[in-house]
Every structure is written in C-alpha cells, then in structure tokens.
Amino acid sequence: MQITGLAKRYRNGEKAVDDLSFRVDRGQVLGLLGPNGAGKTTTMRMLMGLIHPDEGEIKIFGSKVVPGAPVLSRLGSFVEGPGFLPHLSGRDNLELYWRATGRPPADAHLDEALEIAGLGDAVERAVRTYSQGMRQRLAIAQAMLGLPDLLVLDEPTNGLDPPQIAEMRKVLRAYAAKGRTVIVSSHLLGEVEQTCSHVVVMHRGRLISNGPVAELLSRGHLNGSTRLEDVFLDLIGENA
Ligand SMILES: Nc1ncnc2c1ncn2[C@@H]1O[C@H](COP(=O)(O)OP(=O)(O)OP(=O)(O)O)[C@@H](O)[C@H]1O
C-alpha cells in the first residue's frame, strides 16, 4: 500500500491531512499514531475509499483506490464498531454481513476468522449478551472474513481490557506474519510499541516520523529514553 501526497480539507477549510506520503509492505503491522485530531481517521477513511482525497493518491497492490474499485475487495476494515443485530448470534451476524457484500459465500472464511478472533463458543450466543470486548472481537472477525490481504483497523483495542489487548496483539501479528499487511491506528503508544513493526506518526495532518518501531526507539535512546511515548512526545513537541 502506497500513499502519495495525500491531502484532505473539510468544509471549515482546515487541512485534516496535508501532503501525507508513506508505504507499508506485506508482513508489516503499521501503527498510525498521533494525538487527537492528527488526521488518523481521515486517512483511514480515504484508504477505505469512503471519502475522496483532495490531492494525492492511494494505491493498494498497484491499483488506485476509488469508491467501488475492485481492489477494495482485498481490504478488510472497520472504522467504528459496526452495528450488529443484537438478537442474532455472532455467527449469524457475520453471515448476514457477508451476504450483504454480495460476494460468493465460498469466499467467506467464517471459521478461520472466528478462530483468529478467538470468540470460542460465544459465537453461537446472541450479540446482546456480549461484553464490549467481545463485540470488538466480532467486529475484527468481520473485517477479517474474506482474509483480506490488507487489514485496516481504527482503534482496534478500544473497549478491550489488558488481557484482551495482549490477545489482540497476537492476533494482528500472526495475521501479518502470513504475508498480509495490517494497519492500525491507536492512541495507546505502549500498545503500538508492542504490536507494530512500523510506525507513522502524524501531527496536525502531517507526517512527522516514519519507520521501523525499533529505529524510532533507538532514536529515543540517543535522547536518554527507550520509551516510544517519550519519543512521540518529543516529536510532537510536548515533552517538557
Ligand atoms: N467530518 C468532518 N468535518 C469537518 N472536520 C472534520 C471532520 N472529520 C474530522 N475533522 C477534523 O479533521 C481533523 C482530523 O480529524 P481526524 O478524526 O482525522 O483525526 P484523528 O487523528 O483520527 O483524531 P482522534 O484520535 O481524535 O480520532 C480534526 O481537526 C477534525 O476536527
């Protein structure tokens, strides 16, 4: 996935994303990091073909992203927890979702996605009985249903407790280890540090740092810190 010179301006005139360029390759888990309003969600929405960039372009596996582009079938995503039907089981919700995509039933890797999300027997229970964390995992299973080559998740650990976050970390790493690509946005710097192989740091719509997490950490080491959080605060100029 390659983003080149991406820009998006909302109606109030301010640039939510400004001259953004970066790439992510197979096998990588890329963390999109930035403070509130940095432009992470806007970037993700453009990546998913939900909104148009004003400038620049996004290519997934060599094809330009435009609404309805066939290449978008290789992408699985969620921006906010999707609305599940509470009276239906987790499994029925996923089946219903897949039917609505109009894609062939044989392309839905239901059991594999559920296995990856680790919901166990709960998948047969009505979604209304799920905890927030279980809903989040079902949402991730939904995004993974077609075993997409590119998985894009906005704040996937929202609503999860620490053991579930640790579990999610394993799931995402294992997913990328099979030669697929994962992009996640997060506020949780420690989480990005432990989950991601690469990081893009955004601030006020612009890219301020980009590279392997280890490289960023070694840069912090020069300044006397090995914590990504300190490196991050230094980058956005808020480390007093
Ligand atoms: N629909 C919209 N209309 C107008 N401005 C918007 C809209 N969506 C986002 N913005 C503005 O664009 C900027 C970037 O927002 P965005 O949601 O992409 O950031 P973010 O990094 O995802 O933030 P957060 O971490 O708080 O979710 C912010 O200044 C925000 O107020």
Image (cartoon, grey):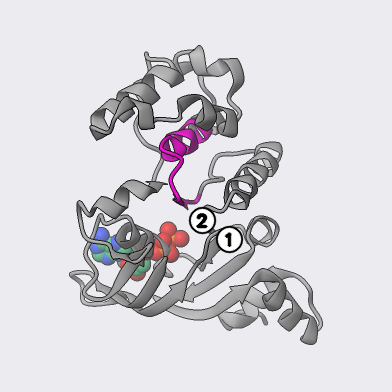
Q: Which residue is disc 1 drawn over?
A: 28
Q: Secondary structure at mark 2?
A: strand
Q: Position of residue 35 (x, y in %)?
A: 51, 67
| Residue at image coords 66%, 70% | 213
Is residue 42 left or right of 153 when viewed as pictured?
Answer: left
Is residue 41 something that shows in the picture? yes
Q: Front-most of 153 and 68?
A: 68
- Residue 139 highlighted magenta (yes or no): yes
Please check the rendered image and state whether residue 164 is part of the magenta-colored stretch, yes or no. no
Report the image quarter containing ligand 1. bottom left
Residue drawn at x 55%, y 62% is: 31
The amino acid sitting under disc 1 is Gln
- The residues colored magenta run 136-155
Label 2 lies in ligand 1 vicinity (Cβ under 8 Å) = no
Residue 63, position as x, y percentages in the image: 30, 64
Between residue 237 and residue 148, name the one nearer to us: 148
Looking at the image, residue 113 lies above or below residue 8: above
Residues marked 2 and 1 touching at CB (< 8 Å): yes
| Identity, as a three-letter code, of the amino acid under mark 2 | Thr
Q: Quadrant of residue 86?
A: top left
Checking the image for residue 181, the label placed there is: 2
- Residue at (43%, 70%) from the top-left corner? 38
Q: Which mark is residue 170?
A: none
Q: Is residue 21 left or right of residue 213?
A: left
176 shown above or below 103: below
The residue closer to the viewer here, 137 or 188, is 137
Return the x and y of residue 78 as percentages of the image width and height. Answer: 39, 45
Q: Residue 119's x, y, as percent? A: 58, 25
Snapshot quadrant of residue 6: bottom left
